[in-house]
Image (cartoon, rainbow, N blue to C red):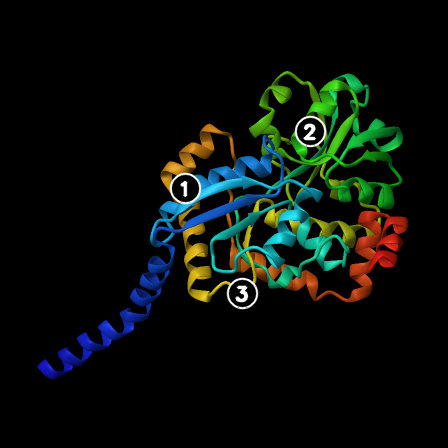
């Protein structure tokens, strides 16, 4: 009996050793290190808000409690950070990137500006499953979905794919002004009357950065991109309500896969597994941290986390689609002319 108890005790110690070793190895590395969260946008927008919020808390949950700082690297709607993360940033766990949800799609459909392989990034998680919107400025006169779908409307854009999809599938006349460093620059353009609206604007960003615009009805929220209506937008139609045939439904379903990773965080490829798992766990723990959730509530940041494993699986699934279907999706989202030009640039 004593011998059996001793064997059981020894087995328990041995079974616990890998976990203890795993945590200790990560702690030994991260102690006294500086981890940087590189934010793929200018200051003041939703990507910036979520990136800084996570950067403020995740260090408490990484073994060794490294110092975590945030750094803005705007450009190409987050592709600059995604490219640097893949190609030149340290692959030791000290560089984390966050950028627009569409970055993975650009890599999957071979945009030459996306110099990374989406499936090879180490996805940490997403802070939210988001609802994207198309809005117009209150004074623009485009105050109904019917007007939005039938009139020429000038949009400010950092990410063109929702508006292009509407043009390709439903014949809208949306014209996009691109080249803005980040979403906050588009909002200034809206206020100045340089553009009439914006698509691919996350509702979480709206209520985080411009809640007064909603309360004071300075903007018209005309359409939402999500699987289900946001509780605060019960009267705003879903893009799926525009569908008239199976082809349109298939394209919309594919594009909406990016909503799962609305606020993505990733590590470069090649990060040692022990450190990757430590940071993934730290991210998951941050999403449950009462102090983080209280801060998010104060800043009106919606938190509906998705694990890195689930995002990794989703990116793998979309990447494995038939090339012809991926090409069709690219044509719809970018427009056939821009898609053809992309082929020539490769």
Horizontal arrangement in the rendering, residue 193 relative to residue 234 (left or right): right
Q: Is residue 1 visible?
A: no
Q: Are marks 2 and 1 in contact (CB under 8 Å)?
A: no
Q: Which residue is mark 1?
A: 57
Q: Which residue is mark 2?
A: 185
Query: Real-space Cα distance between discs 2 and 1?
Result: 27 Å
Query: Real-space Cα distance between discs 2 and 3?
Result: 35 Å
- Up/down of 259 relative to 235, above or below: below
Q: Earlier in the sequence, mark 2 or mark 3?
A: 2
**Res 152 label:** none
State which mark lies toward you, 3 or 1.
3
Image quarter in which the N terminus is found: bottom left
Q: Residues within 10 Å of mark 2 (few under 14, many from 20)?
A: some
Image quarter in which the C terminus is found: bottom right
Q: Which residue is mark 3?
A: 270
- Up/down of 328 relative to 216, above or below: below
Can you give x and y, in whole percent of width and height, for residue 12 in the image? Answer: 23, 73
Can you give x and y, in whole percent of width and height, for residue 76 in the image? Answer: 71, 44
């Amino acid at each position: 009996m004593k011998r059996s108890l001793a064997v059981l005790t020894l087995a328990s110690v041995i079974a616990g050793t890998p976990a203890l070793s795993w945590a200790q190895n990560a702690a030994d590395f991260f102690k006294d290190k500086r981890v940087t969260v590189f934010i793929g946008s200018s200051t003041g927008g939703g990507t910036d808000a979520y990136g800084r919020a996570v950067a403020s808390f995740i260090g408490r949950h990484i073994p060794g409690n490294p110092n975590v700082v945030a750094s803005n690297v705007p450009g190409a709607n987050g592709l600059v950070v995604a490219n640097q993360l893949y190609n030149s940033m340290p692959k030791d766990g000290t560089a984390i990137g966050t950028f627009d949800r569409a970055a993975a799609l650009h890599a999957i459909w071979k945009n030459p500006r996306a110099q990374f392989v989406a499936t090879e990034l180490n996805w940490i998680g997403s802070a939210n499953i988001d609802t994207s919107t198309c809005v117009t400025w209150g004074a623009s006169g485009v105050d109904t979905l019917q007007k939005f779908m039938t009139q020429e409307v000038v949009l400010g854009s950092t990410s063109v794919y929702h508006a292009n999809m509407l043009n390709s599938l439903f014949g809208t006349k949306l014209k996009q002004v691109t080249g803005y460093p980040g979403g906050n620059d588009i909002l200034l353009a809206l206020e100045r009357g340089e553009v009439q609206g914006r698509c691919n604007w996350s509702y979480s960003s709206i209520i985080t950065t411009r809640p007064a615009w909603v309360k004071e009805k300075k903007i018209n929220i005309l359409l939402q991109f999500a699987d289900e209506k946001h509780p605060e937008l019960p009267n705003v139609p879903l893009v799926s309500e525009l569908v008239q045939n199976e082809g349109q439904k298939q394209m919309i379903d594919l594009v909406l896969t990016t909503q799962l990773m609305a606020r993505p965080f990733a590590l470069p490829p090649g990060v040692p597994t022990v450190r990757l798992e430590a940071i993934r766990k730290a991210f998951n723990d941050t999403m449950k941290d009462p102090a983080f959730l209280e801060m998010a509530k104060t800043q009106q940041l919606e938190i509906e986390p998705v694990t890195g494993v689930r995002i990794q699986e989703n990116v793998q699934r979309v990447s494995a689609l038939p090339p012809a279907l991926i090409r069709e999706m690219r044509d719809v989202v970018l427009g056939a002319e821009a898609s053809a030009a992309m082929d020539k640039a490769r």
